[in-house]
Amino acid sequence: MSAEFLNHEFSGMFVAVTGSARLKGYGSAIAKEFANRGAAGVVIMSRDAKNADQAERILGELQDRGSKGFWFQGDLTDEVVQGQLYRFIKGECGQLNALVNNAGALVRKPFSAIARAEWNEVMDVNARTAWELTKGLYRLFPREQGGAVVNVGSVVGPYGNRGQIPYVASKAALIGVTRSLALELAGRNIRVNQLNPGYAETDMTEFLDESTKAIIAEHTPLGRIGTTGEVAYYVVNFCSPRGAFATGAILDVDGGIGFANIGIATNRAIEAKRGK
């Protein structure tokens, strides 16, 4: 495939990426990958203006790549805000060709220390909102052309992990959401797939010290932690017109740590820290 084609692959298309206003997150990398491939417009989103400096920088990077950037702020777990998002995209873009449900919440605690409110918040952000946003926005997809939805899960969803029960449960639930939506939206030519990242250098993994990262890399068959750009590449591929025969697919982009048993790596990292 020529570089010229890739630079225009999403020409005339508009895409929206939730959880995309942080420089070190998957969302901003995904937004920029769409721009690299010629998207006409990219909607980035954040819950509030806390990361305004980062969001403005991302918008500038989208513009530098030839795409028009739009920034929507609001709590997407709120149905009123979801309606505002629909009107925002319709007014600014006129249509939607791809939606990436990337926003995520994480609680790191032993199962016995997790409160119900924490459980509910993680489930709401990671699973319920992906369904509700798809339900609220799919009518913006051109009826004949269709489009693509990609849910960003996690490799811990199918395999489990220690100290992250609400997160694991929400990402496992997202697999069911993804496959069910794929069945229901196929008649509209809207493809729904899920990508499960493993460990990568993001702001959500900054809490890991170098020794922990080394243990994780050791238990990853490819021998290293991933990058946000590598994850973004596969997310955008799912949305490509050239990927129009994939729906209901669940893809792990994790260097192999999932099938090699993510729990072993996590347990060894915890035990190593306790032994210090």
Image: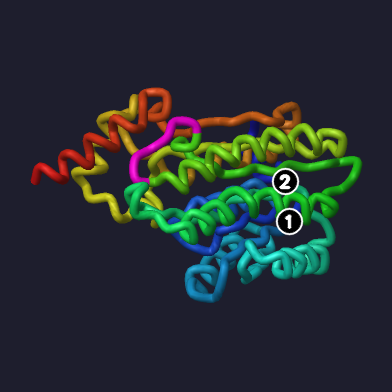
Judging by the rendered image, the residue that carries numbered circle 1 is: 40
Q: Residue at x 82, y 63 (%)?
A: 90
Sequence order check: which comes first, mark 1 or mark 2?
2
Q: Quadrant of residue 193?
A: top right
Q: Position of residue 153 (x, y in %)?
A: 54, 42
Q: CA distance from mark 1 to mark 2?
A: 7 Å
Q: Residue at x 54, y 76 (%)?
A: 49
Question: Horizontal placement of 175 versus 79: left or right?
Answer: left
Q: Crowding at label 1, few (<14), some or many (≥20) Cα neighbours within 10 Å?
A: some
In the image, the segment drawn in magenta is 158-163
Q: Is residue 159 magenta?
A: yes
Q: Residue at x 42, y 38 (%)?
A: 198
Furthest residue in direction right, as rendered: 144
Q: Position of residue 188 (x, y in %)?
A: 86, 39
**For the residues bearing labels 1 and 2, Cβ distance under 8 angstroms:** yes
SS for dot 1: loop
Question: Horizontal placement of 181 versus 69: left or right?
Answer: right
- The mark found on residue 10 in the picture is 2
Question: Horizontal placement of 59 versus 94: left or right?
Answer: left
- Is the N terminus in the top left, top right, bottom left or bottom right quadrant? top right
Q: Position of residue 131 (x, y in %)?
A: 69, 48
Type of amino acid under label 2: Phe
Secondary structure mostly seen in magenta is: loop
Q: Quadrant of residue 68?
A: bottom right
